[in-house]
Amino acid sequence: MSFNPNALAWLAGRRSNGRMTDEPVPAGVLAQALQAALWAPDHRRLQPWRFQVIQGEARAQLANVLEAAQRAQDPDVSASQLEKIRLQPWRAPVLVVAILQPVVHDKVPHVEQVLSMGAAIENFLLMIEAQGYHAMWRTGLLVDTPVVRGRLG
């Protein structure tokens, strides 16, 4: 078995990059990264996750969902805070939402399914980077609200 000494340096150099541009990400790049996510360690091959790609004007719909979620949490939220929330989906040309859909299984506990989804996300991020694009993993505080959960499934 051979070892690629560049692999360790490449992994050590991978960092989330919050400086996004409006450059569109080609569909083939996303498809390759999503394929890499499917190769994550996954006991019993349950694939207890799904990925939702949000880009273009669909980001405006996500902005509406985030605003509704914030209003539901805090009816007295300020206009400036709402504007900040509405701008969040526009920080990158493409958002890929990882959604855990755990499977009840007597041999695969919930925590293992969560970890498997984390590995799938990491595979996705690594493949995006390998193709010359930047990515970051960010979870907003509103993702656990009933409004966002209901809208994104």
Image (spheres, rainbow, N blue to C red):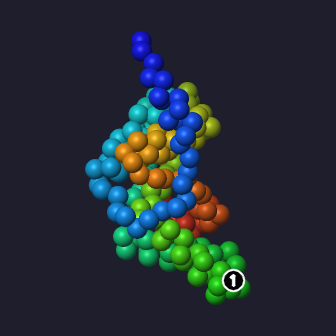
The residue sitting at 43% across, 31% down in the picture is 45
Choose between 22 and 73: the one closer to the eye.
22
Along the line of sight, which residue is nearer the eye, 98 or 12? 12
Residue 19 in the image: above or below residue 103? below
Query: In the image, 119: left or right of 76?
Result: left
In this view, the residue farthest toward the top is 1
Residue 98 seen in render: yes
Q: In which quarter of the image is residue 148?
A: bottom right
View extreme (left): residue: 28
Compare residues 92 and 140 and report the one nearer the observer.
Answer: 92
At x 65%, y 80%, the residue is 81
Q: In this view, does 64 lie above or below 98?
A: below
Q: Disc 1 designates what residue?
A: 77
How crowded is the residue under tag 1: few (<14 C-alpha within 10 Å), some, or many (20+)? few
Does dot 1 land on a helix, a strand or a loop?
A: loop
Residue 135 horizontal/vertical position (percent):
48, 53
Q: Percent position (x, y) of residue 103?
A: 51, 40
Position of the N terminus, as image quadrant, is top left
Q: In the image, residue 31 lies at what x, y percent?
A: 32, 48
Q: In this view, does 142 lie above or below 41?
A: below
User: Residue at horizontal 39%, vertical 48%?
Assistant: 132
Residue 10 against residue 21 in the figure, above or below: above
Q: In which quarter of the image is residue 68?
A: bottom right
Asked if one can make out residue 54 in the rendered structure from this viewpoint, the answer is no
Q: Quadrant for residue 22, please give it.
A: bottom left
Q: Residue at point 54% right, 71% down?
A: 88
Q: What residue type is labelled 1?
A: Val
